[in-house]
Amino acid sequence: MAINRWLSNYNGVMKLNMSRHSIILLIAIALLAAILVTVLQPPAEEPRELALNEVISMAKAGEILEIVVRGTALEITTIDQEKQTSTIGEATDLLEVFHQEGIPISGAQAVTIRFEEEVGITWFPVLLNFLPLILFGGLLFFLLRRAAGGPNQAMGFARSKARMFSGDKPTVTFSDVAGVAEGKEELQEVVEFLSNSEKFLALGARIPRGVLLVGPPGTGKTLLSRAVAGEAGVPFFSISGSEFVEMFVGVGAARVRDLFDQAKRHAPCIVFVDEIDAVGRHRGAGLGGGHDEREQTLNQILSEMDGFDTNTNVIVLAATNRPDILDPALLRPGRFDRRVVLDQPDINGRKAILEVHSQGKPLDSAVDLGVIAKQTPGFSGADLSNLINEAAILAARRGKKDISLVELEESIDRVIAGPERKSRLMSRKEKEITAYHEAGHALVARMLPNVDPVHKISIIARGMMAGYTRQLPTEDRYLVTRSQFNDMLATLLGGHTAEEIIFDEMTTGSQNDIERATKIARMMVTEYGMSDKLGPRTFGKREELVFLGKEISEQRDYSDKVAEDIDAEVHDIIDRAYNVAQDILTKNKAKLIQIAERLMAEETLEGKTLDALFDSPLPSPAPA
């Protein structure tokens, strides 16, 4: 029903837009036709104006057939049916003039004289002449009025595009936000100030004028800011940083002024600027210098935030995942005084987020969200929301009435690697290579002490991967040791090494593993100081190039000799990890073959089944 209602609304909107477009098209066609008629129509011959003595001469010569007198105007018709005009004085009697001149006004050769009442101005020819101008003016008025009232406000481009949400009926509160307990605690003071500012003002306290929410994408920055507005019950203005700046010079600064004017009129309220790094980058870094439009917008934001009165109940919330590129003037006290960091949720936070997003969804009684939380390390709040939604879609696709653990675990793989590509057919040889590759990863990880345990291995293609090995940490980890990095590198190279041992060949399937291993080894040397030869120091300063998006340059602060040492150290670290993987797989070749053959038969091994396979004895060799 909802889909049908949406389709009917969509069709209605499309018909309305089509009717408006049709009206504009008809007006344009009528305007063009009127212009063409006016331009192409041959001009009418105007009657020649005669003097009164010329009229008398022509009458004496018998050239005039009729004269029509309308007040002081004379309309003359010659015997050749030509029209002429003339005028006489108001006190002049044409009959008396003709009588004095001896012109007959009766008889066969007489000039017919008729007297008619004087008529007013004929408006139709006037309107016909002005029709193109009238149509053009009407079309211009229609277009300007439409543009001024529409969402693209051509005549109001300097107005703020912030969307206002009333706080009378809050749709999001703190109960809808989980996994960010510290962030909610920090922002609770903002709620108290907006709802009971006298409590703070009585003590001379000043609430932070700006609160900057910092965190990776999907950690709930926007959701938390709306929860603040919902809890406080105040208007909430939401705008993106990219909506300030457009092609017109000065538009960004004008929109900032208009936004803050609206906020002051609706105080107490909250102004939320999402992705503030779009306009809040370091000044002086652009090619436009001080006249850069983005910098002018930032300057206006700085002046507006610093211009608040102490008793103005307007609080600015801003969100970004790039605090390192923000201008220092934006972060100083008096503007964004407080910084709230929203990190990836821990296991308890993930469980709480899953409970929030699973409300209203029928879960099987055997589902334990704590188990799902353990299997989703590194997932953000948005990832967990998507996980629950994918599980609901899978359950509906399979005709189930509730969501079971099977759908939840499969949705984890869908979020990480994408949906299964069952239509992708692999040859027997490629399937065998993939099985040994993934078995190599799993076996090396099993044998090393500083690697997360293997939870699942599969040779079913997902996304761009022909197979995958998934490991689960036993606990949330915030620090990584050198030993863990070394064992991680050996695990990454396990697939490549297994291909060499079994097939004496290399394939392109290890490209991503080798790329990740090289990146980790270089970070160990240049960023983490984990090199015995080069010692605890960093090498190179990474900077983002202006106007090049993700393009990153490295400012070298070391010599060419040190660069050679860095390359040598990276090579040695990877080489040692490769030797570890090769030693493990060579000594346990029979177990590698056992795992790969079982994987080829069942395609997916996980959980207790995989643990039992690792611990099972090797099959006895067939008798000769």
Image (cartoon, grey):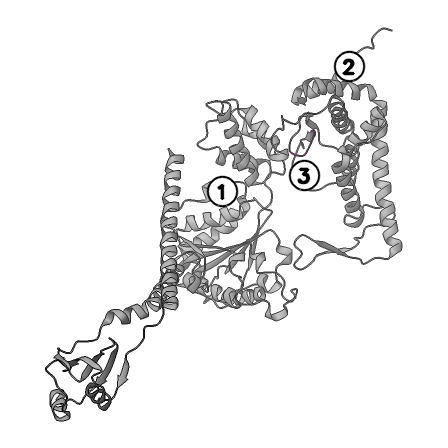
Residue at the spot x=71%, y=32% of the render?
Answer: 452
Q: Which residue is mark 2?
A: 617
Q: Is residue 466 magenta?
A: yes
- Count of marks overlaid on the render: 3
Q: CA distance from mark 2 to mark 3?
A: 33 Å
For the C terminus, the image quarter is: top right
Q: Is residue 614 above or below residue 371?
A: above
Residue at the spot x=58%, y=62% of the render?
Answer: 330
Q: CA distance from mark 1 to mark 3?
A: 23 Å
Instruction: Give SS at disc 3.
Output: loop
Instruction: Give SS at disc 2.
Output: loop
Q: Is residue 334 above or below residue 609?
A: below
Q: Nearer the viewer, mark 1 or mark 3?
A: 1
Nearest to N terminus: mark 1 or mark 3? 1
User: x, y percentage for residue 97?
Assistant: 14, 91
Nearest to N terminus: mark 2 or mark 1? 1
Q: What's the magenta region?
A: 463-467
User: x, y percentage for residue 221?
Assistant: 53, 48
The amino acid type, in three-letter code, at marker 3 is Arg
The amino acid type, in three-letter code, at marker 1 is Val
User: x, y percentage for residue 7?
Assistant: 40, 38
Residue 488 seen: no
As drawn, which residue projects farthest toward the right?
561
Q: Name the main secondary structure of what is drawn in magenta.
A: loop
The amino acid type, in three-letter code, at marker 2 is Pro
Give the numbered dot on residue 177: 1
Q: Which residue is mark 3?
A: 477
Q: Quadrant of residue 581?
A: top right
In the rendered view, does 189 fall on the left or right side of 16? Answer: right
